[in-house]
Amino acid sequence: MLIALICTDKAGALDTRKANRDAHLAYIAETGVVAMAGPLLDAAGDMAGSLVILDVADAAAAESWAAHDPYAKAGLFSDVRIQPWKKVIG
């Protein structure tokens, strides 16, 4: 099941994102369930959120993955949307 995590960073949290980026990328590599991912950008081109597509068994697995993400543990996000997603193109 493909699930999109659409995450918005808290205002002024770019330093928190940068400080936890290596741990976040290691978590992605270790868990092996990320189909694609990348930062959302603000008008200035700075990282301001995340879009992560997970390939997991169910929504509960996605919620668990999101909760254990180092970005979430660091309190980076103001909100996280967990939404089933269907790949059509790409």
Image (spheres, helix red, strand yellow):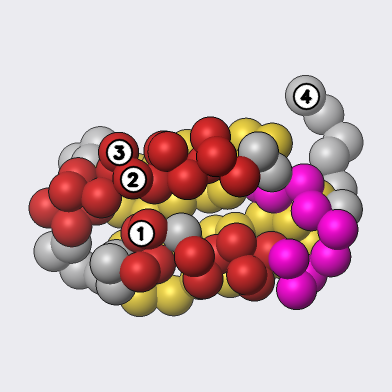
Residue type for callout 1: Tyr
Q: Residue at x 69, y 64 (%)?
A: 62
The span shown in magenta is 53-61
Name the residue nearer the viewer: 89 or 16. Answer: 16
How far, Cα to Cα, is label 1 from label 2?
A: 8 Å
Q: For the residue labelled by badge 1, is the local secondary structure a helix, a strand or a loop?
A: helix
Badges 3 and 2: C-beta atoms under 8 Å apart?
Answer: yes
Q: In this figure, which residue is indicated by the disc labeled 2?
A: 23
- In this view, which residue lies farthest toward the top? 90
Q: Which mark is residue 90?
A: 4
Q: For the residue labelled by badge 3, is the local secondary structure a helix, a strand or a loop?
A: helix
How far, Cα to Cα, is label 4 from label 2?
A: 28 Å
The image quarter containing residue 65 is bottom right
Q: For the residue labelled by badge 2, is the local secondary structure a helix, a strand or a loop?
A: helix
Q: Residues within 10 Å of mark 1 (few under 14, many from 20)?
A: many
Q: Position of residue 27 (x, y in %)?
A: 47, 45
